[in-house]
Image (cartoon, rainbow, N blue to C red):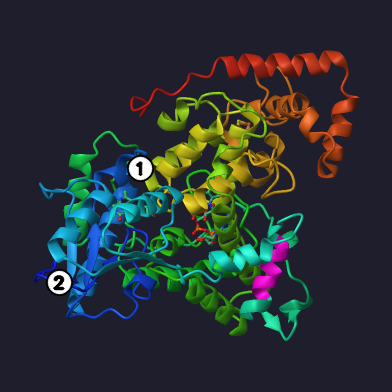
Amino acid sequence: MSAPPFPPPTSPAPPGGTLRLVLGDQLSHSLSALDGLDPLRDTVLMMEVRDEATHVRHHAQKIALFFSAMRHFAAELAAQGIRVDYVRLDDPANSHSFTGEIARAVVRHAPARILATEPGEWRVEDALLALREELSIPLEIAPDTRFFATRGDFERWAEGRRGLRMEFFYRQMRRDHALLMEGEEPVGGRWNFDAENREALPATVQPPAPPRFAPDAITAEVLALTAREFPSHFGTLDGFGWAVTREDALTALDHFIAHALPRFGDYQDAMRAGDPFLFHAILSPYLNIGLLEPREVCAAAERAFHEGAAPLNAVEGFIRQILGWREYVRGIYWLKMPDYARSNHFNATRPLPRFFWHGQTDLACLAHVVAETRDHAYAHHIQRLMVIGNFALLAGLDPAAVEEWFLVVYADAVEWVELPNVHGMALFADGGVLGSKPYAASGAYIDRMSDYCAGCRYSPKEKSGPKACPFNYLYWDFLDRNRETLARNPRLAMPYRNLARFDEARRHTIRADAARFLDALEPAQAGRDW
Ligand code: FAD
Ligand code: DLZ
Ligand code: SF4
């Protein structure tokens, strides 16, 4: 596909129109901020600002993805005859903050009002609300209608409930949106086929290669800009192959439905060294920046089931991730922020280890996942949860430091989805708002679900001594040290019964192994680690 012209030519707006904001994760033609747009009077404002790339030092591929997709979206709007005021990062007058750029655009266009769509981050909404107080024209914030559930829908669902479990929210969403339903009943007679979705990946099974999209002229310019402006950021730009247009994102969706969805369910939890993608969709960045909409992605999966192209365990499992988990974590985020981010259930304070950035560790599973994250700005769910997240939980890493790492390193990381997954699901730092128990696991889990251990200097079978897998003693040490808060959890009754059978000598060895390992971790030093 040839690149559309960029930047699109702009003519001055007549005073009195609406200034419509489109942020970097709002690249959807259906966006509420574009509703009722009058091309003669209105202006769309898009801003590349340094503050957004550096408030945490995002992975270079993530910055390039956002900027290139923003530029392509701006060009598409301009091709429809819409006036787009696009502020480039290298514009000498750029103030490098959203609020600074909105204030400057108000002077340029003299609008009667500003219309935004709810941002994806509490931080950004807070800044917009503060700006609203200072402006002499109204700034309206419209609901983000691209999600199945609005923030208000989730609040109503949550109201008066003692526990906010995802499973019950998901069932309600299936009913409300008639997805995989036969009347009032779930297709196949069950809501959840997870028990069938936990297979390890046999060496003979070859996953499809994910589609890569060669950079066009716009992307090539953005890649050069990113390399020049953010040279010290984590991650490589080599082989950048993300879709940056809706057209290419739709190709990626079609590819997933045809080639990976049929076995998505079976191998959803599997991991293989050197193959980060397996049968996963690799669609989260496109969903999160708006190139794809969750409704069309779920509809495509449901269609594949009805056409006999994919089995129910795969399609239900996939739809649950989007209709269930994705909507649920967004609901939790907006219901609980900003206090949510401040909780620290285990009082975990250990600094982030340095290897989270440079990846040089003799724990093979962690070395693989960090290296793949550096190369692709991607890791799949179980790598994030059961390798990196599990390690962070067991090692008692400071939740804020871990959250910042996750926000930096993944192309799909926008805070509304990153934070609940890290803070709640992986670290249990919310004390059980999101999950009913911590996802803590020993090396046996990683060994069962991956081939990492075969190439590791440690052994998942050894419990103590120099060859013992550190996940083993860290797991028991975690349970032992957090006995006060966890022992009464009925879902942890079995491991605590096992721990009670350990004699004092074994407990002492566990504590000593864990302390020796944790004391040897070299802490990260901001900006100097990779
Ligand atoms: P698939 O495994 O193919 O799943 C399909 C889709 O389901 C994804 O594209 C995604 O949109 C959705 N989905 C799946 N699981 C979740 C979930 N737990 N929460 C929300 N949506 C989900 N997802 C993000 O989009 N951004 C993040 O910053 C992010 N951080 C995470 C951090 C941790 C510690 C964990 C455990 C999970 C995180 N996730 C995050 C969820 C999940 O790991 C990614 O959505 C998924 O790996 C994206 O790859 P995929 O498109 O191949 O997903
Ligand atoms: C992630 C990101 C980056 C790197 N840069 C920009 C930017 O320059 N302009 C922009 O509009 N958005 C950017 N984003 C996304 C925002 O940081 C943020 O995630 C969303 O606006 C959600 O509030
Ligand atoms: Fe990871 Fe332990 Fe397996 Fe090594 S032995 S790869 S550290 S789980």
Residue 149, above or below 506: below
Using the rendered image of the protein, determine whether residue 503 is visible from the camera's viewpoint: yes
The number of numbered badges drawn on the structure is: 2
Which label number is shown at residue 58? 1
Residue 411, above or below 390: below
Residue 506 location in percent, x, y?
Answer: 82, 17
Type of the residue with mark 2 = Pro
Q: Residue at x 64, y 78 (%)?
A: 176
Which residue is at the front of the view, 499 or 332? 332
Which residue is at the front of the view, 18 or 120? 18
Residue 154 location, quadrant: bottom right
Distance Cα–Cα, label 2 vs label 1: 37 Å
Which label number is shown at residue 15? 2
Count neighbours of disc 1 (C-alpha within 10 A) and say few if under 14, some if 14 to 19, many if 20 or more. Answer: many
Residue 292 location in percent, x, y?
Answer: 41, 69
Using the rendered image of the protein, determine whether residue 383 is visible from the camera's viewpoint: no
Residue 450 location in percent, x, y?
Answer: 61, 44
Find the magenta span and give its range: 167-174
- Cβ of mark 1 under 8 Å from ligand 2: the answer is yes
Which residue is at the front of the view, 516 or 527? 527
